[in-house]
Amino acid sequence: MAKKIYINGTKRCIMFGKTMLLPGSNVVDEIDGNAYPQFRAYIENGDIEESDNAVKAVQKANTQSIVDEIAKTAPKDENVKKAAGNRKKQLDAIDAEAKAKKAEMEKKEQEDGE
């Protein structure tokens, strides 16, 4: 089965059989709309988007592993490589901020416990 890029525009995970679409971009086996009428409804409502635009999908990706998978779908496209590099910087900044906040909270808890 061919891999497709789907963008889940909702704020929740959606399951179709064994396939889970996380919020944001996903690279998964093609989902059969005939087997899953609810999938067609999500597509028609605009909650899920089938995307051939790898640059847009990279921008909506929430993890580096998804960015890497999307980049593999268009390995020779320089725009995708550039978007993937930019998104990696954004995700790294988010991770660094989260780690700093966690360390700050742990330090405060430790100080409060003394």
Image (cartoon, helix red, strand yellow):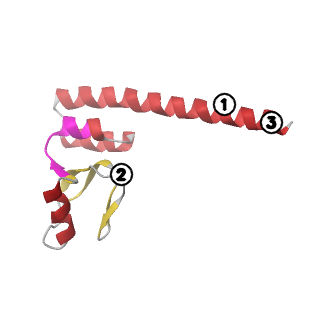
Residue bearing mark 3: 112
Which quadrant would residue 20 be assigned to in this image?
A: bottom left
Q: Position of residue 77 (x, y in %)?
A: 16, 31
The three-letter amino acid code for the residue at tag 2 is Lys
Q: Which mark is residue 104?
A: 1
Q: Position of residue 25 (x, y in %)?
A: 28, 46
Residue bearing mark 2: 11
Q: Quadrant of the N terminus?
A: bottom left
First to last magenta residue range: 49-58
Is 82 above or below relative to 24?
A: above
**Proximity of marks 2 and 1: CB atoms separated by less than 8 Å:** no
Question: Alpha carbon of mark 3 to alpha carbon of mark 1: how far?
Answer: 12 Å
Is residue 97 left or right of 107 when viewed as pictured? Answer: left
Regarding mark 1 in the picture, which secondary structure is present there?
A: helix
Is 73 above or below relative to 101?
A: below
Pointer 3: residues within 10 angstroms few (<14), some, or many (20+)?
few
**Proximity of marks 3 and 1: CB atoms separated by less than 8 Å:** no
Residue found 39% across the figure and 42% down from its top: 63
Q: Is residue 106 one of those drawn in magenta?
A: no
Residue found 87% across the figure and 36% down from its top: 114
The mark nearer the N terminus, 2 or 1, is: 2
Single out the residue that lies furthest toward the front. 45
The three-letter amino acid code for the residue at tag 1 is Glu
Which quadrant would residue 41 be assigned to in this image?
A: bottom left
User: Mark 3 or mark 1, which is nearer to you?
Assistant: 3
User: Mark 2 or mark 1, which is nearer to you?
Assistant: 2
Q: Position of residue 87 (x, y in %)?
A: 33, 31
Q: Is residue 57 one of those drawn in magenta?
A: yes
Pointer 1: residues within 10 angstroms few (<14), some, or many (20+)?
few
Residue found 45% across the figure and 27% down from its top: 93
